[in-house]
Amino acid sequence: MNAQPSSRRASRKADPSKGEPPKRMLPRGRNPLPNVRFSIRLKPKQKLADVRKCIEIHLGTKLADFFPDLLRYKDSIWKYDPRRGRNRLREHLVDDATFDKRKRDLAAGKLVGLPFRLEEPSPAIGKIRLPITGELLDQKFVILTLPIQRREFRQKNCCAAGKLYDFSHALKKACDVASVTPALEHPVTLQVAAFSALFPSRAAPPQASVPSAATWHLANIRANTVPAGTTGAGVVVGHTDTGWTAHPELNFAGGASPNYTAGFEACVWPVPGPSALEPVPGIGIPGLTNRFHGTRTASMIVSVNEGTVAGLAPGATIFPVRCTPDVVLLPPGLDDVVLAEAILVAVARGAQVISISLGGYTTEILRWAIQVAVFANVIVVAAAGNYWPLVVYPAAYPECIAVGGSTADDLSWAYSARNFLGPDIDISAPSEFVVNATWAGTTSTTQANDGTSFGTALVAGAAALWLQTFGRTTLITALGGRAPLQELFRAHLVATARVPSGWNSALDGPGILDLSGLLSAASLPNPTTFPIPAWLIAFFNSLAAGANLLMNDLFGQNLSGGVPRWADALFADAEGAMTEFGAEVMQLIMSNPLAADMIQSLDGAARAADEAAANAEEAAEEIADQARLAAEQAAQTAGEVADAVVDAVSDGASNAVSTVAGWFS
């Protein structure tokens, strides 16, 4: 996957003052209201037409209680927008006679054309070739979209995420598909008093206020040791974010930038399209949003203006994929499906590095997209997360390189995610008081910001320098297919990480990015003898056994800390339950990180209740009447314990962080 040919390197023309809006504008400048969606993995040889029929029949019969309004909707419901007046809804409803006929026909197994969509996630997958584990491309995913707005669903349903998972489990059994997972939104979380011990506040270190504030991050990672001419030239960095703007710190001058190529971009939000341009000024709520996040993070990779913003790989080519309008405050439409689509598009268009400064829950389709990228020998780096104690996904996947945050005075950034549930962070990089590009209205400017997003962009830039230094094709050839290129890069990152005095490697990973070692041939692991990594052996074992190669090994082997304790406390068969319900369990844990420890403290009580219930059941076989009373009492005890678990979990975290882990800037 080499950089695009020179014939495609025409300079991009754009108007930096107007922002050059995308070709497909939304009505009245509004973002679309996101709909309820599910990712479905089909079993081998299942036909899409058969699955479609099964879904429609069950949506109108056995599963109708989940979405009862669907039976009354006309196909025109897709055009309905409650922001233009709720009284217009009646225009999109069938009459009573049609409603009754639909119910009768569906009960008889006849299709009535219920308004739902079942589509493949991305046409880009057909353009991808995998030199390693091509079987991954045999995985068949489809996206089920209902004309039910997420906001409306949340308003009508208590514990909306749980109900969506309930529907997922029911649909999986009803249609005998491999898996069904809801695409959940990821509103950003806030720091709350409950986490004050984990995230103590602190003042800016002196290094952030001196004249070198714009370049301290480069000095911190020893960028002064990078050989002259090593700029990341010839390397394509896929950038899944809010898109691009014609900002001077992205090296735009006269409407053109050497790092951006006309037509070399993509958009998967709000509708698939060619333009990844983010409008200037942006759409959002002033003071509560983080617009131009794609511009901010890209400037850490390519900016050449060291007096203002210092990028690490100014010779790299950026392939921007717009997949969200924002990364803070309920970004509409951003979910695991959208991010998976963005990753697949970047791989198909020739990205050699993918920088993901977003994160949230775990789903099969997102992990599959990461695996496709890694087995295509793309280096994938992702942000560990901010203001949250757990590493988020996709950074938490063993295939991905997770980037934590560090500071100018060589501390772990106080608000970076940490390894509380397992060994996840692979490297840390400057993430506090980092100067980057943004806009103030229609005026280009710069600003110091915090976030593992910026450390992630720096590691992506380092990957570009690394590929230019050692030669991507040379490294892949030397590896001989024993391991993805990602693993060689990860091993080199870890081996050369700088470990400051007092660094907590158990919680914050091996250390801080150090280019003086990373770009040295003397420290490069020998590709010809590079061992197969442990996670890859487990992956191939799962593949050979015909197991679920997307989730089994993740929940069965790669998670530690509180997750197994949680599973053991709730399920008799923890391993089997995590295979079946792992994504939902992780969603619950990440919605309330304190819950795992709370459940551990209640674990003994729960086990005692289970044992009492089991003993009562055995006694019931001998003395039915007396034992029945004992069983009822034991069951009541177990119920009280379960209620205590729920109460402890609910009381342990703020309402502001009770539902999601968040997409982090």
Image: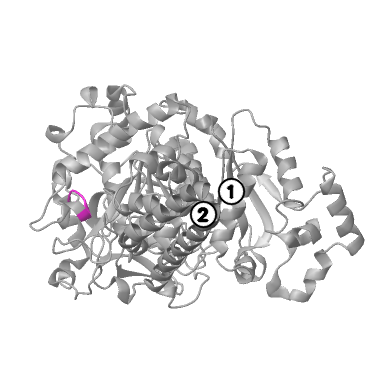
The residue under label 2 is 276
Contact flag, marks 1 and 2 (Cβ < 8 Å): no
Q: Residue at x 71, y 45 (%)?
A: 55
Q: Residue furthest right?
A: 97
Left or right, 54 with reference to 142: right
What segment is highlighted magenta in the picture? 507-512
Query: Is 48 drawn above or below residue 390 in the view shown?
Result: above
State how many labels appear.
Answer: 2
Could you tell me which quadrant the C terminus lies in?
bottom left
Across and down, in percent, residue 14 comes to 50, 58
Q: Residue furthest left?
A: 501
Query: Is 318 drawn above or below residue 637 in the view shown?
Result: above
In the rendered image, is residue 9 in sight? Answer: no
Helix, strand or loop at mark 2? loop
Helix, strand or loop at mark 1? helix
Left or right, 69 with reference to 453: right
What kind of residue is marked 2?
A: Ala
